[in-house]
Amino acid sequence: MAVHKWMLTAADEGISVVSLDFSSRHIGGRLPGWTVRKTRLRGGLSEGVDVVHVDNGRLSFSVLPTRGMGLWKAWLDGEEIGWQSPVRGPVHPQFVPLMEPSGLGWLDGFDELLVRCGLESNGAPDFDQQGRLRYPLHGRIANRPARRVEVEVDDESGEIAVTGVVEETRFLCWNLRMTSRISTRLGESHLRIRDEVENVSASPTEVQLLYHINFGKPLLDADSRFLAAFQKMMPRDARAAEGVAAWDVYGPESAGFAEQVYFLQLVPDAQGWSPTLLKNAAGTRGVGVHMNTKQLPCFTLWKNTGAAADGYVTGLEPGTNFPNPRTYEGRQGRVVKLDAGGSAVFQVGLEIHDGAEQVQKAEQAIAALQAGVTPQVCQRPQAPWCVV
């Protein structure tokens, strides 16, 4: 029994594997039923994007080392989990104008199932008093390519993992390194993400991180519902306050729909974990996002039920903070402070529920956490959670 490893990218050693396809036959036929495939896309905005596609025999997903180790899409038993963005990606970072004056250039590359926001900042665009952009929307980490990528398979536990090292560095400013490990096991319907962020600098620094996890059709439909055990929920702004009465229920496609965003403080279990659930209207399909609230204490629900052509989508977003402008969040102390040489670990799980029984079990787990905790539903935005 052994752990088998394959190096796909090692920038320091000049290694960059363009394509590779391996399976159980590469480890003597042990642990049958999985495959890992590496490709490099060609053409259009995807030119040069590396994709590592993992299939555990039931759940498959595509990792994007070129885009900060994000997850492009996933499939369970062949059914796609993700959303249909009007952006035709995955988009190479060279085509994403992060620092354009509006601060919204990040949206030019947005089409993933899971995209990280951070590490210097992760929220709305932030401008100085002269109107100059200080921090762009959602930060830079999603548009930084991994400099080291490795795949490993444990033929005893059945674990398949992709590990990537992504750096966000600016001379004389900051020096951060994120080591991301995305793993699953043979035949599972879920995957795990473990990110360790290190401050490589000799000076202390601050970090923000948010997981923008996005779902659309066919999972999201009219009367789909979001469930979580929570202590407090607050609308981000006046637009979100308009929908407080149905903040956890989704409407049908609506052309021109203006996004609504809600901030939550979740109820954790004894180990700090808290599950959330998005289920379809029939209650026959669902997806769970699990996070450790000791590491990611803030949760954001993003509802964007516009026309399908414009992106009918919702985001379930665990974070170190709420995605307000960086300077505002800094004043509230919602940052992770890292000493020189220090590090912090962040963990998220994604689980697909493929039947009514599994959905009901997920609902019951959330109800058990909620028992004994009376949730507070705020009717309007309030400081210090929101910019008011």
Image (cartoon, helix red, strand yellow):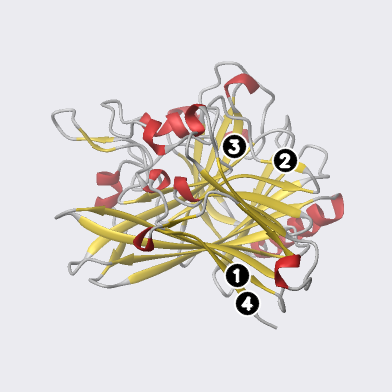
Say which label, 2 or 3, has the lower sequence index.
2
Which of the labelled discs sits on residue 3, or is there none? 4
Regarding residue 292, the answer to whether it shows in the image is: no
Q: Which residue is mark 2?
A: 80
Say which label, 2 or 4, has the lower sequence index.
4
Q: CA distance from mark 3 to mark 1?
A: 25 Å
Q: Residue at x 34, y 62 (%)?
A: 12
Say which label, 3 or 1, has the lower sequence index.
1
Q: Is residue 315 above or below residue 192?
A: above
Marks 2 and 3 in Cβ contact (< 8 Å): no
Which residue is at the far top? 255
Q: Is residue 86 above or below residue 228?
A: above
What secondary structure is marked by label 2?
strand
Q: Which residue is mark 1?
A: 269
Which label sits in the foreground, 4 or 3?
Answer: 4
Q: CA distance from mark 4 to mark 3?
A: 37 Å
Which label sits in the foreground, 3 or 1?
Answer: 3
What secondary structure is marked by label 1?
loop
Left or right of 75: which side holds 146? left
Of residues 192 and 322, the one drawn nearer to the viewer in this rendering? 192
Q: Quadrant of residue 108?
A: top left
Marks 2 and 4 in Cβ contact (< 8 Å): no
Which label sits in the foreground, 1 or 2?
Answer: 2
Which label sits in the foreground, 1 or 4?
Answer: 4
Q: Residues within 10 Å of mark 4 (few under 14, many from 20)?
A: some
Q: CA distance from mark 2 to mark 3?
A: 15 Å
Q: Is residue 212 above or below residue 246?
A: below
Q: CA distance from mark 1 to mark 4?
A: 32 Å
